[in-house]
Structure formats: structure tokens, C-alpha cells
Amino acid sequence: MKPLFSVIIPSLNEEKFLPRLLSDLQNQKLKNFEIIVIDACSSDNTIKNILRFKQTLPLRIFKAKRHNVSFSRNFGAEKAKGEYLVFLDADVQIYSSFIKNLNKAVNNNKGLLFIPRTVPDEKDQQMEVIFRIVSFLTEMSQYVGKPFSNGGSMVVEKNFFNRIGRFDEKLFLAEDHNLIQRAQLWGVRAKFLNHLKIKFSLRRMKKEGKLEAFYKYLVATAYILIKGDIKKEIFDYQMGGAEYKKLKNKISFTDNMNNYSKIIKEFFSKLLSS
């Protein structure tokens, strides 16, 4: 039977996090989906650790030679059999009712593009407030000229995804925002699903520190609003799970505040003058 959803997961050295997500998919109340993992030639035990799931899940695994998340997502979309493409990052978690709620949302809304709500994957009061604010701004942005995504996790009708040109593989960052904005040019506004939650990993913030991570998000957002698509490397941004084997807070939220304030001011000055 043809699945309604194709869950597409790019991976690179995700031996710890990807099995966790596959376990969540194993526990789904509704099973009308397939899973496609596109692994960018991981050097750790990613493949070994997920092979066991092939016994209990409709899982297909492909290898991609390029370390490019947009390429991996597009590659997965080419292999997909489902009507809707569900893009998930390898380090997220989902609730057991995720597919069931998504199925209900798709049937009720009859839309082409959906954005789930993200919540932090750990109990952190400060982060919970920030995530609520980000979700609100993301939802409101769908009604303006430059809508934003809520991260790489989204749901797109397959034919529409191909029609608008898929993810742009030339971008350094923010390929998710770019797709949402191109969809709006086609007259399609993304539907923000508050009740469909995805647990977003805080591992980057643990590794880099909250302040540095927020600095990068701020810079990326400002660049998109002022200059447009991010086609060049504007700061260091590592992909893959290898960078997060030893997670600990590197920088507290208040550390080096003056230093980062100066860096942000200098960046905005250069951005506005160029």
C-alpha cells in the first residue's frame, strides 16, 4: 500500500541521535508512512546503529557523497513514494501522536505546505519562553512579504515541492526559509501547526554556548532580511553529529556579552554599508 507520508532524514555522523528519532517513529500510533535516510558517508556507527530498525520499520537507507543538507533532502524526495514529504533533522524527537496529528491536519486543512511547532528537547524555562516567541514570530511571518521557517522540519506536498524547484543546493544556510518564501511567490502560504510539536535539540547551544548560537541566528536572520539569500559562508557553521559527542555548556548566556554586542554592531554596520 502506498504511504501517505515519506519521512526524509539527512544524516552525517548521527550514531547517537538518529536511532532516537527512529525509535520515536517506531512508536507512532498511525503507520501510514515510509522512512528515507540519506547518509552523507558517516565515519561513525550511524549506519550500523540504524540497520536494526529495518526489521520493524519501512526504512530505506541511501548514501550521498555530498555533505550538503539540501542535496540530501532533494535526493530523498526523488526516492519518496508518499504524497507528502516530511522533512526531519536527525537530532529531533517527535511524540507518538505526531503522524496521527499530521494526518488529521493534512485532511482538515487540505494544504500544500505545513510548519510544525518546535519546542526544546529539555526542561529549560528560559529556552521555552524563547521558543514560544520564535514560534509566534514564525507564524506571523507567513502573512508578510518574507515568511520564515521554524527550522529544517516541514511538510510539503511532493508535486508542489518539485514544481517550485525543491531546496536550493547553492545556499550556505537558510535553505528552509528560502523554500517557504518561494512557495509564497507561487501563492501558497505555509500553514503553521501549533498542535504538531517537534522536540528541537539544544545540542548546538550546549556546544557553542547560548550567546554564540543566538548571535549566529540573529546574524543569519538579519542577512536574509537585508541582503537576501545566504550564498556564502558568513560565519562558521558545522554540520553533522560529530561535533556534539561531548556536550557541555561552553559559554554561559551572560559571558562575553560586551564582546558579542560589539561584534553584532560591526556586522550590521558592514551589512548596511555594502
Image (tube, helix red, strand yellow):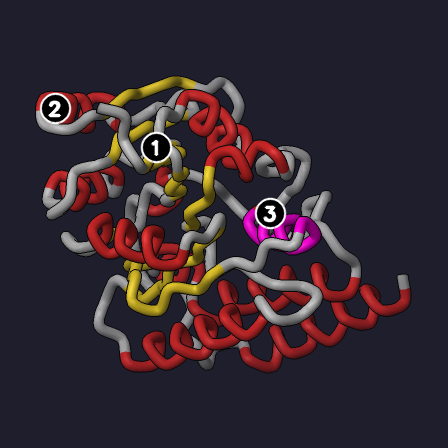
Residue 226 drawn at (x, y percent): 77, 65
- Mark 3 is surrounded, within 10 Å at the Cα level, by few (under 14), some (14 to 19) or many (20 or more) other residues, namely many
Task: Indicate left or right for 7 with 174 as reference.
Answer: left
Q: Is mark 2 on a helix, strand or loop?
A: helix
Closest to the camera, between mark 2 and mark 1, is: 2
Labels 3 and 2: the sequence-earlier one: 2
Q: What element carries label 1?
A: loop
Provide the residue designation for mark 2. Answer: 52
Residue displayed at 11% across by 47% down: 29
The alpha-carbon separation of the residues under discs 3 and 2 comes to 34 Å
Residue displayed at 43% across by 57% down: 115
Closest to the camera, between mark 3 and mark 2, is: 3
Residue displayed at 70% across by 52% down: 185
Q: Mark 1 is on which residue type?
A: Asn
Q: Quadrant of residue 218?
A: bottom right
Closest to the camera, between mark 3 and mark 1, is: 3
Q: Mark 2 is on which residue type?
A: Arg
Provide the residue designation for mark 3. Answer: 179
Which segment did they paint magenta? 176-186
Q: Quadrant of residue 68?
A: top right
Residue displayed at 44% across by 71% down: 135
Q: In which quarter of the image is residue 28?
A: top left
Residue furthest right as drawn: 273
Mark on residue 273? none
Work out whether 31 lies above or below 118.
Answer: above
Asked if labels 1 and 3 touch by Cβ distance under 8 angstroms, the answer is no
Mark on residue 13? 1
- Mark 2 is surrounded, within 10 Å at the Cα level, by few (under 14), some (14 to 19) or many (20 or more) other residues, namely few
Q: Mark 3 is on which residue type?
A: Leu
The alpha-carbon separation of the residues under discs 2 and 1 comes to 17 Å
